[in-house]
Amino acid sequence: MTFNSQPKVKKIKKPTRASLVKKQDTEFSIYIRKRFAVNNKVSCFTCDKIDTWDKMQCGHFQSRKHYSTRWDRKNCQVQCVGCNVFKYGEQYKFGIHLDQVYGTDTAIGLLNKARKEIKIKDFELIGMIEEYKNKNSLFDF
């Protein structure tokens, strides 16, 4: 009987597309909720409720199903759970506030952008994950 003396080499598993999207969603959500926080507190984009960033959510004006706007920094704003979940994102108020903050026709611009299909490759997602991990590491709370 002979034995193979070579040690088994574990294969490095390539991350799945779903796991990359989930990681990017997580890093991006942290960034959105922390970017305007002062002393760990941030206000809801649609109702002005103030709470700590970790109790708030990353709300989307255009649905996350649209990859062209899924990680767009204007499309994504801090929302409380009441507005984002129970009031279905308060899209009308969200759109009005977008135009007030970023300029007239921002909301319609995001609506049009959401209608455009894009393909994001896995290596691009990996780059985005690293970018937002780095941005998040710069926050001092």
Image (cartoon, rainbow, N blue to C red):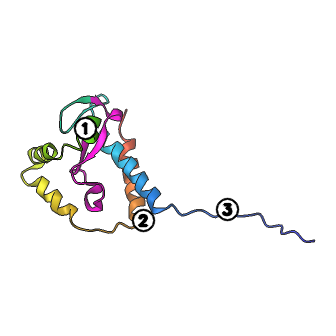
Say which residue label 2 marks: 123
Q: Is residue 52 left or right of residue 22?
A: left
- Which x, y percent locates residue 108? 11, 57
Q: Residues within 10 Å of mark 2 (few under 14, many from 20)?
A: few
Is residue 71 found inside the magenta-colored segment of the image?
yes
Quarter of the N terminus within the rendering: bottom right
Amino acid identity at mark 2 = Phe
**Residue 91 versus residue 15: which sits nearer the camera?**
91
Query: CA gap, disc 1 to disc 3?
Result: 43 Å
For marks 2 and 1, the one nearer the N-term is 1
Q: Secondary structure at mark 1?
A: loop
| Residue 49 sits above or below residue 101 on the image | above
For marks 1 and 3, the one nearer the N-term is 3
Amino acid identity at mark 1 = Phe
Is residue 25 found inside the magenta-colored segment of the image?
no
- Residue reaching furthest bottom? 2
Q: Residues within 10 Å of mark 3 (few under 14, many from 20)?
A: few
Say which residue label 1 marks: 36
Query: Is residue 139 something that shows in the picture?
Result: yes
- Which x, y percent locates residue 113? 19, 62
Amino acid identity at mark 3 = Lys
Query: Is residue 130 something that shows in the picture?
Result: no
* Residue 10: mark: 3
Q: Which residues are magenta?
A: 51-80
Q: What residue is rendered at 28% in x and 41% in y?
A: 85
